[in-house]
Image (tube, rainbow, N blue to C red):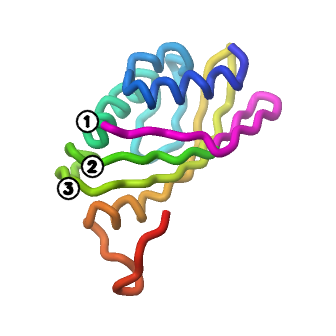
Amino acid sequence: MQSQALVEMYIEMLNSHNADLVDRFIAKDYVNHNVVVADGREANRDFWRMFFVGLPDVAVTVEDVVVSGDRVVGRFVYRGTHCGELMGIPATGARVEMRSIDIWRVEGGLFAEHWDELNLMQVFQQVGVLPLLGGDQVVRP
């Protein structure tokens, strides 16, 4: 599968809330350089199932995709409502906006390795588990 198609499948999985679609774009022995998600396709599937419980209406948009050799870089925005437990945080009903920059290495037509940067501090502020910096400051993700 071509790199752009892998990103499109990733977005389809996110927006359809179908974690089983990871079989189509993630290698079984996927290496994930992310402190929240363990290595492997099954760990990735389990993470997304948990994520969809926490943000059941999440919708993801693509801001940029860059392909260079065996690397794919994507910049994404996730928007949803915190209606279920998410990473141990009980539902708050808060609207959440999270941005990510993801880098994948492609091997054998699948994502084989992953690095990312997430604005989790702002997410934790949006759901009220961290205070806003500067007092009354409004969080603008």
Classed neighbour count for the residue bearing mark 1: other residues with Cα under 10 Å, few (<14), some (14–19), many (≥20): some
Q: Quadrant of residue 61?
A: top right
Residue 89 appears left or right of 122: left
Any mark on residue 112, and which? Answer: none
- Between residue 48 and residue 135, name the one nearer to us: 135
Q: CA distance from mark 1 to mark 2?
A: 9 Å
Mark 3 and mark 1 lie on one chain; the one further toward the N terminus is: 1
**Horizontal side, residue 132 vs residue 98: left or right:** left
Q: Position of residue 66 (x, y in %)?
A: 75, 38
Residue 39: % across, % down: 46, 31
User: As displayed, is residue 4 above or below residue 81?
Assistant: above
Q: Per the image, is 93 magenta? A: no
For label 3, count other residues whose C-alpha is less than 10 Å away and answer few (under 14), some (14-19) or many (20+). some
Q: Name the residue at the left extreme.
A: 90
Secondary element at tag 2: loop
Q: In what element is the residue under mark 3?
A: loop
Residue 70: say if magenta.
yes
- Marks 2 and 3, Cα distance to the nearest angstrom? 6 Å
Q: Is residue 78 above or below residue 95?
A: above
Dot 1 amino acid type: Val
Question: Mark 3 = which residue?
Answer: 92
> Disc 2 marks which amino acid?
His
Q: Is residue 62 left or right of residue 44?
A: right
Quarter of the image for residue 45 reads top left
Magenta segment: 57-74
Q: Nearer the viewer, residue 106 or 141?
A: 141
Q: Is residue 72 above or below residue 21?
A: below
Q: Kindly identify which numbered label has been placed on residue 53.
A: 1
The spot of residue 115 in percent (x, y) is: 59, 43
